[in-house]
Image: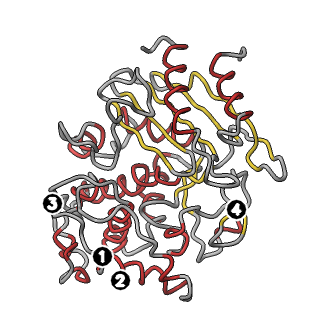
Amino acid sequence: MAFSPIDALMEKAVREDIFPGAVLLVGKGGHPIFFEAYGVANRFDRTPMTLSTVFDLASLTKPLATTLAVARLVDQGKMALDQPVREILPEFGKSSAGQIMPRQLLCHQGGLPSHERFYMACKNLFPSMRKSMMLTLLTRTALVFSPGKDTLYSDLGFMLLCRLVEKLVDCSMDRFPEKEIYGPMGLNNLFFIDLLDGAASRNFPCAATELCPVRNRLLIREVHDDNAWFAGGVDGQAGLFGTAMAVFTLLQILMTNDSPPLFFSRQMREGMLYGDVGNRFTLGFDRPSKPVSSSGRYFSADTVGHLGFTGTSFWMDLEKSVIVILLTNRVHPFRWSSGLLAFRSVIHDAIMEHFGFQ
């Protein structure tokens, strides 16, 4: 492919240390039309970034794993979106969070705080005990507002959704999407890394993240999110790893819902992709914020996506059938780089202008 204005912006971002490396994939009408890798996956050994590099997808776990697992359970009749949490997890019987419903958790309207350092209470426990402690800590967490009364983006809400899923399927969160969603879709490059069963020893090309001050080492092939790591690497707010192509394939199937068998009912699919008018979030997905969005100026009102702390993102324009996936390791080797915040809107505008998608 000839050198383009998009390439120029991406290489400039690498030179200016906005991120060490990245993979950018643009799809239109079901097909990739731009797919390139830039920079390095690891600053220390200079491993080049490639199209097959696996990334810690961070909060992309929320829409691409946890939300889809909930949708599958709802379609199977095993969970109801408006069912109080305490009906599934009796541990919440006396907790203020027991009244929250999965629909509210998916839309970040459950009233749980945005984040808590639960890992600080778990770090001295045996690894096998940490996940149950996370559940205990969730039951003890006070709400910041009554469920449904406001909106606050919450990692804790998706940690709770993970525990609802695991209770209903009687297995770890990583296994249910693999069996029910990724496997049937033929996706081999979307997966969790369960640190309790030795999966971290798997060898695959992976972008490095942070020189972690909590774990005192460079993180490669282990989740960056500390709460997810102390829970064993598998949780609802973070823990999913994958390649840009795997993310694109999943989003494309979700957009069209035409890959047999149909994976989600019409009701669940429309709830995830379109949601309720006026809500900032659909079921599990983000919408472009107003007046300024990381998706730039040209994505239509019918757009959903998500951002990840490690430097990952996707935006999916349902009206224009355009998908843009930008995966970076911007937290490598330290999380303090903030240039990606402004760069995202610049690169998305450049993409839409270059391909005439305005």
Could you tell me the amino acid type at mark 2? Thr
Mark 4 lies on residue: 211
Q: Are marks 3 and 4 in contact (CB under 8 Å)?
A: no
Alpha carbon separation for disc pair 2 and 3:
23 Å
Could you tell me the amino acid type at mark 3? Asp
Q: Which residue is located at x 28 percent, y 48 percent?
A: 283
Secondary element at tag 4: strand
Mark 3 lies on residue: 82
Label of residue 136 in the image:
2
Alpha carbon separation for disc pair 3 and 4:
41 Å
- The answer to which quarter of the image holds residue 300 is top left
Tell me where residue 25 appears, x and y as whole percent: 58, 31
Secondary element at tag 1: loop
Q: Which dot, 2 or 3, sits closer to the camera?
A: 2
Instruction: Choose the circle earlier in sequence order: 1 or 4.
Output: 1
Alpha carbon separation for disc pair 2 and 4:
29 Å
Residue 290 vs 76, above or below: the answer is: above
- The answer to which quarter of the image holds residue 152 is bottom left
Q: Which dot, 2 or 4, sits closer to the camera?
A: 4
Q: Which dot, 2 or 1, sits closer to the camera?
A: 1
Tell me where residue 8 appears, x and y as whole percent: 69, 21
Q: Quadrant of the N terminus?
A: top right
